[in-house]
Amino acid sequence: MKPILFGLSIITIFLFSSCTSSLSEKLQVENEQFSKTFFFSNTSADKIEVQYFSKSNSEILNDTKSIPFFEFVINNTLVSSNEKLWVFQSHSTREMDNNGTEHSLIFEGVKGQVKGLQVVVCQQIFSNSTLVREKLELKSKGESYNLNKLDGKLHFRFPSYSIQNKTKSSVESTEIRIASWEKKPIAFGDKRKGNHMYYPDVIHSTVSDELQTVKGPLSIVSNSEISWFTAYEHASQDDLSGMFDKQKLGSGNLINDAMQGTKGVFNFPIVEDDFKFIGISSQSSTENINISVDVLRGAYLEGEIIDVEHPYSTVWSATGFYEGNNLEDGKEMIRNYLMNEICEKPASRVPEFYYNTWGMQRQDKRKPLRDILTYERIFEEIEYAAELGVDIFVLDDGWENTQGEWFPNSERFTDGLEPIKKRLDKYGLKMGLWYSPMGIDSTTQSYKKHQNWVIKDSEENPIMAQWNHPAFDFVSGFFDVFVGDCKKMIDEGCRFMKWDAINTFYSCLPNLEHGSEKYSEEEIRARYEYLLPIYVVRAMEKLTDYESELIIEIDLTEARRVMVGLAPLSQGKMFWMNNGASWYNDYSTHRTKSMRTIANEFAGIIPLELFTYANYPHNENGAMKYNINNSLLAGHGFWGNLKLMNKEEREWIGKQVKLSKKVLPFLVDVNPNVIGEVGDSPEIYSVVNENEAAGQIVLFSEDSFEMDYATKINSEKVLGVLNHTYAIQNNQLTIPFKFEKKESSVAVFIIPNENSGISIVSSSSELTDVEIFDNKLQYWGASKGKQTIYWDKKNGTPNVENGVGIDFDIVEKDKIFQIIVTCTKGNTKVIVSKS
């Protein structure tokens, strides 16, 4: 079965007497596919019930009375939506920037321990989706309340649904994790080695009458009739893998990579459950399937105060459903959620290419990493990067004065970044900057002034974080300082930020924003670790609200990075890998295969446009084409010393990037069809928008091979297919791949005709570009060959302009002219115009 999708969203609100519940009023939020109804009273204390209704089969999906929609402990009393405590107060809406609608429903407690406590239920609903993104907030109008544990454990459950299982079918659970460090060895080369990355992990189990809680953050629970999707937006790695690995030392500046983690003396145990802050629980009863999102660790402190100045909020979660139990339909819902619904900032969803200076800075280990960044050298690299066709130029570590002083280095950039910004503007490039948000140089005035922010180890010594610098506690007043520093650079023209080294720093500093000195170090540390991803995302949100064109990528290239999860995707992207199973200055295909493992593993789960990583575009080992095709596929990044390339090489890459940019806007919502693992022959990534006739098919092969590859396509909308011979017939594109060399690659681009009625339906030779310009068809052939063109009669009678080495024949048919062009020499430009 396909996911439940629909056209225009119809959002309607009703407030009137209910005939399906004992409660007196209801408020209904609906679109063409489903309705979600809140039952309540707006005059006297009563319950709050929530009902899902599927319009496709006219069926109520859940039991509204078996389990409460929310449940928590306040003032040492367990309270829930199922108790007669609540009165409806108000409802408001906000139209979202991603075409969703946010509804805020406010209920107020009117008796007992919750008298005066406001419960704000936020619901975000979208067209073309049954998914609802939701959050619950507790607010006070004046009274003070305390959150408490239940039987010694945290207890806050929201949202909860009891899905009807009328057929009493067996219930299966699919948990999808995305943060399993070194889950498996590499699929190429020495298969005993790891790839130095986080992997997805799909875990299947059976739901029974015993409550089971999975980490997620993605879960699909299914019987034979319906599948229920749940997700939560937080972040943590899945287990202890990589936490205690010894760092490798090297020569020259390579030794600095021993300083990417957290160094210090920690005399407390670190266990796998430390990463389980939130879980998704499920339980199967006789006729229902109970599903909820539960807090597990650090979500609040025993006795944590809720008052006017201290509201409490859950993280965002998402729920949705689809008919049947096809996991692929569930994955489609996940991809749509992560690409289009979780984030309101469209800038981070636009396909763009970037260049980062870090690879260039690491090229010569005899030179200081940061002193390489001078006006003269940066100006050179900007010019070269522009030839590659990139959109963004990122200055990595070294532009700043020092860690914690996020302004241009006063010695090397005496005129600030303005000269660099002007040079970037000349080439139409955006300026990007690297940050280590929590790092603080111990020589700075800020470090000396704010010792209460300096994270300490168990012996009260400052921890050593990235590059052997101390780290500030981000869940403190430092948050506002850092956001303010970033805003200043946004004002200077920064439109892209890379946030690095947000690690597990184990802060147990008291009297900040994660616990006073009355709590134990363990409690303060747990609260800090829970809040850190929330504060980081909050900072991202403040900055992207300040500048809507700003893109923030979070570096997740090491174990111990706390932001690996869904939370950062609500505001930006994820930088997933530095070098993987390789190292800096590896221009071979080995490093490229390591990078491509990201696309191979995550395709079908997380949209590839949400990952960033950089490949070396160089031709040092004859692997230029192979390597740049990897950046065309995903990641879209380049780095390394571009002076090592010649102008012809850089401009050739620029042409390929330009072709990719022609089709990528059509592909952001298309799931790649992947054949093979990394290192297989063949290994194919086909990303084709069948209806719009746009796509790119990127093929890699370890050994020589030959095959005819076919994919469906709307033949009437194809303008041409580039970089390989092909034929289109009966809405099917066939490409006769034949690779004779080891470690070969090709990127084939399918260019749409934008309803022009002009299509090159076959070519026996490789075409290098095609366009419709000034009402003319223009294309370029790399070698001798024959092309068949269909020309709609609405465009008039075609005329092939005379040229050396061009023969043609025009045959009039019913609705089209068929043009056969024969090129008798290579590097030929063919122009067809209206006569």
Image (spheres, rainbow, N blue to C red):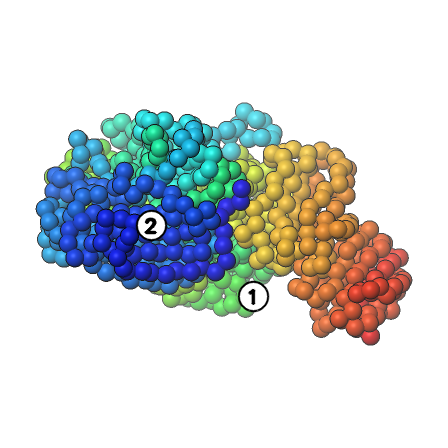
Residue situated furthest top in the rendering: 192
The type of residue carrying mark 2 is: Glu
Taking the spot 63% from the left edge, 55% from the top edge, the residue there is 691
Of label 1 and label 2, which has the lower sequence position? 2
330 relative to 41, above or below: above
Which one is in front, 657 or 178? 178
* Residue 179 visible somewhere in the drawing: no
Which one is in front, 820 or 493? 820
Taking the spot 27% from the left edge, 38% from the top edge, the residue there is 66
**Image quadrant where residue 519 sits:** top left
Which one is in front, 608 or 94? 94
Per the model, the C-alpha gap separating discs 1 and 2 is 43 Å
Mark drawn on residue 427: 1
Marks 1, 2: nearer the viewer: 2
Mark drawn on residue 134: 2
- Residue density around tag 1, few if under 14, some if 14–19, many if 20 or more, within 10 Å: some
The type of residue carrying mark 1 is: Tyr
485 relative to 706, above or below: below
Q: Position of residue 671 (x, y in %)?
A: 56, 46
Residue situated furthest front in the rendering: 19
Taking the spot 40% from the left edge, 30% from the top edge, the residue there is 168
